[in-house]
Structures are given as C-alpha cells and as structure tokens.
Image: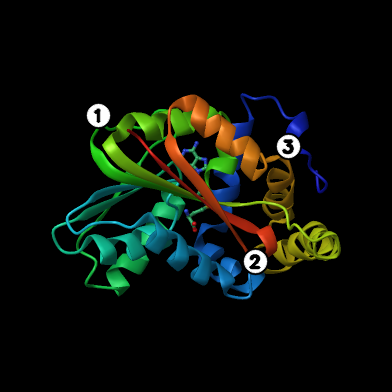
Amino acid sequence: MENFDCKKKDLLEKPQLILGYFNSVARRYDMMNTLLSFGIHHVWKRTAVRMLGLNSGDRVLDVCGGTGDLAILAAGDAGPSGHVTVYDFSSAMINAGRHKKTYLSDLKHVGYVQGDAQLISFHDRSFDAAMVGFGIRNVIDMKKGFEEIYRILKPGGKMMCLEFSKPSAPLFRLLYDLYSFYIIPFLGKAIVGSKQAYTHLPESIRNFPLPDELTDILKHIGFSHITHRKLTNGIAVIYLAKKD
Ligand SMILES: C[S@@+](CC[C@H](N)C(=O)[O-])C[C@H]1O[C@@H](n2cnc3c(N)ncnc32)[C@H](O)[C@@H]1O
C-alpha cells in the first residue's frame, strides 16, 4: 500500500483514512510543518489571520483547526473579550494543540471541540468570523464544509481560507512538484513513519480547485466580497469572503 491512491478508495473508507493519517502524525505535525515548509507556514498563517481583520471581542471558529496555530494567532487579535474555538475531528490533533495551549499559558480564550466540518455542531449565525487553514482540502464534501461555515457565521461575518495551490511559474512548479511528490513522502516515512500521510498531501493539493474555481464555489454558496491573495508564487493562497 506504499503508493496509495486516495481516489481509488471507497468514499465510506476515506474519512477514516484521513482521520487515521492525522491521528498518526499529530504528535510531530507542528515540527513536520516547520521542517517541510522551511518555517514559511508561520509567515503565511500570520499574514492570513491579519488579513481576516478580527475585531476585539470577536467569536471565531477555526474549522479543521488541528493543533491550533491559526486559533492562537486569532486569540491574540480578538483580545481578552474574544473567544476562539478550534474545531477538528481528530482527538490526537486537538490533544497536541492543548499541550501547546498549556505551554502558552496566556491563551485562556481558546477552546477545543471535536467534530466533523461537514456537520458543524454550533447554531446558525453564532460566530463573527471563521477560518479554515490547510483543512478544507481534506474534507470529503468540501462544498458542504463551506456551506456549514456560511451557516454558522453571523450576517456580516468574515471567512478566511488558507489553502495550498499550484505555483504560477512553470519552472518553480516543476521543482515544487518534484519536492512534493518525492522528497515530502520520503521525509514523512523517515521522520514520522507514514509515507501514506505525506503522499496524501501532494495528491490532495493537486485535486484542489484553483483560485478562480474556488471563488465560483464560494459565490454559489452565497459568500460575497470574495478575494484571494497568492503567497510564495502561489504555493498557498489566502481567500477572504463575507456573509452579507
Ligand atoms: C493539515 S491539518 C491543518 C491544521 C491547522 N489548521 C493548521 O493550519 O496547521 C488539517 C486538519 O483538518 C482536520 N480535518 C480533516 N477533515 C476534517 C473533517 N471532515 N472535519 C473536521 N476536521 C477535519 C484534520 O484532523 C487536521 O487536523
């Protein structure tokens, strides 16, 4: 099963498979992110949360929040009267994030809820802002995930999605493909012991809609004021949108 292809898997098995990947890499997820992105993911995340433009006192949902990097940044921006909830289906990722929270003892305003992004366990119109960072790509029914984000936002609420995409420059794209399809799975196997989880990463990026396609999907769901900004030649993209 080393060269596992997600597309061949039955839809019923896929969520369990993805959950299994994240449970298996959770303990070293942060370290791997920093290693594989040469630390750039911290800059992307800081930029994305800043662009979301949170107000003091905002209630924020971090969908597919994992170990809570975005939530921690957002908690700083929303201030002591704000609150950020990390929402993720992997208990192992949540626990890894909780540990980080204990370490950063000033983060009293970050909470954790385990659940599926395709059926968010919060009432309609209950958040001022929602974020999803490098997560929606893994949600089997991505459209349903965005519909749920739309549902839980208050009118006037803001959404930020940070997601991988494809570099614009052909030569850079070639180098990036070589890195993602050969080096990343190799390092995943060598360091975390899971080649599959890190083969899933480039596969899922390749299957994810390009910025203009994603913009159409968001528009169709009802979002307005949709903009995007490419980062590092398009390796990652920040999408911003509003619920009117
Ligand atoms: C690549 S990690 C991103 C974590 C974090 N947002 C970050 O930027 O570092 C993707 C996360 O999405 C979660 N996830 C994937 N599918 C999900 C779903 N259907 N419902 C909830 N969480 C999901 C995984 O458990 C994982 O923690």
The dot on residue 123 is 1
In the image, 16 versus 242, the foreground residue is 242
In the image, 220 versus 176, the foreground residue is 220
Please say which color scheme the image uses. rainbow
Left or right of residue 165, residue 19 in this image: left
The residue labelled by disc 2 is 232
Mark 1 or 2, closer to the camera = 2
Query: Which corner quadrant of the image does residue 96 belong to?
Result: bottom left
Q: How many marks?
A: 3
- Residue 140 in the image: above or below residue 3: above
Relative image position of residue 140 (x, y in whole percent): 58, 31
Q: Is residue 238 visible?
A: yes
Which amino acid is tagged 2?
Thr
Which amino acid is tagged 3?
Cys
Relative image position of residue 197 (x, y in whole percent): 67, 51
Q: Residue at x 51, y 71 (%)?
A: 43
The residue labelled by disc 3 is 6
Relative image position of residue 110 (x, y in whole percent): 26, 57
Q: Secondary structure at mark 2?
A: helix
* N-term mark: 3 or 1: 3
Query: Which corner quadrant of the image does residue 13 belong to?
Result: top right
Q: Residue furthest left?
A: 81
* N-term mark: 1 or 2: 1
Is disc 1 surrounded by few (<14), some (14 to 19) or many (20+) residues within 10 Å? few
Which amino acid is tagged 1?
His
Q: Secondary structure at mark 3?
A: helix
Relative image position of residue 178 (x, y in whole percent): 84, 62
Q: Quadrant of the C terminus?
A: top left
Is disc 3 surrounded by few (<14), some (14 to 19) or many (20+) residues within 10 Å? some
Q: CA distance from mark 3 to mark 2?
A: 27 Å
